[in-house]
Image (cartoon, rainbow, N blue to C red):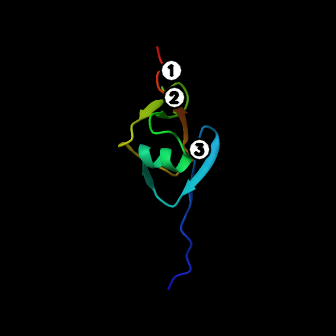
């Protein structure tokens, strides 16, 4: 048996830190881990002048560079 501990990857949702031993998470998994309501839109903060990217529930996102996400309630655009 191996005593190796799983490597934890850290990410942030609305400035709160979370961790997972998975290398990839779906938008829905991120919402579930962070307790984000299902009807909220999740965004991945991009670096520099790149626009932030909308993450749908079925999108798979690599986790491992301390990604920052934010959740937006419905009907707050426009």
Residue depicted at 45% across the width and 56% down the height: 23
Q: Looking at this view, is 39 or 15 the one in front?
A: 39
Residue 7 placement (x, y as % from top left): 55, 64
Dot 2, how many residues are within 10 Å of its Cα: few (below 14), some (14-19), or many (20+)? few
Question: Mark 2 to mark 1: distance in Å?
Answer: 6 Å
As helix, strand or loop, the secondary structure at mark 3 comes to strand
* Mark positioned earlier in the residue sequence (3 or 2): 3
Residue 65 seen in this snapshot = no
As helix, strand or loop, the secondary structure at mark 2 comes to loop
Look at mark 1 in the image and give the residue it sits on. Answer: 76
Look at mark 2 in the image and give the residue it sits on. Answer: 73
* 9 relative to 5, above or below: above
Residue 41 placement (x, y as % from top left): 46, 32
Dot 1, how many residues are within 10 Å of its Cα: few (below 14), some (14-19), or many (20+)? few
* 62 relative to 1, above or below: above
Residue depicted at 42% across the width and 45% down the height: 28
Residue 37 placement (x, y as % from top left): 50, 39
Look at mark 3 in the image and give the residue it sits on. Answer: 12
Question: Mark 3 to mark 2: distance in Å?
Answer: 17 Å
| Residue ranking furthest to the bottom | 1
Q: Nearer the viewer, mark 3 or mark 2?
A: 2
Residue 60 placement (x, y as % from top left): 38, 46
| Residue ranking furthest to the left | 58
Looking at the rendering, which quadrant does residue 12 occupy? Answer: top right
């Amino acid at each position: 048996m191996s005593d190796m501990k799983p490597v934890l990857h850290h990410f942030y949702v609305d400035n709160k830190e979370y961790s997972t031993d998975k290398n990839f998470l779906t938008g829905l998994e991120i919402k579930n881990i962070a307790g984000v309501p299902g009807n909220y839109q999740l965004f991945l903060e991009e670096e520099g002048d790149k626009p932030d990217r909308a993450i749908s529930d079925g999108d798979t996102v690599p986790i491992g560079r301390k990604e920052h996400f934010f959740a937006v309630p419905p009907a707050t655009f426009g």
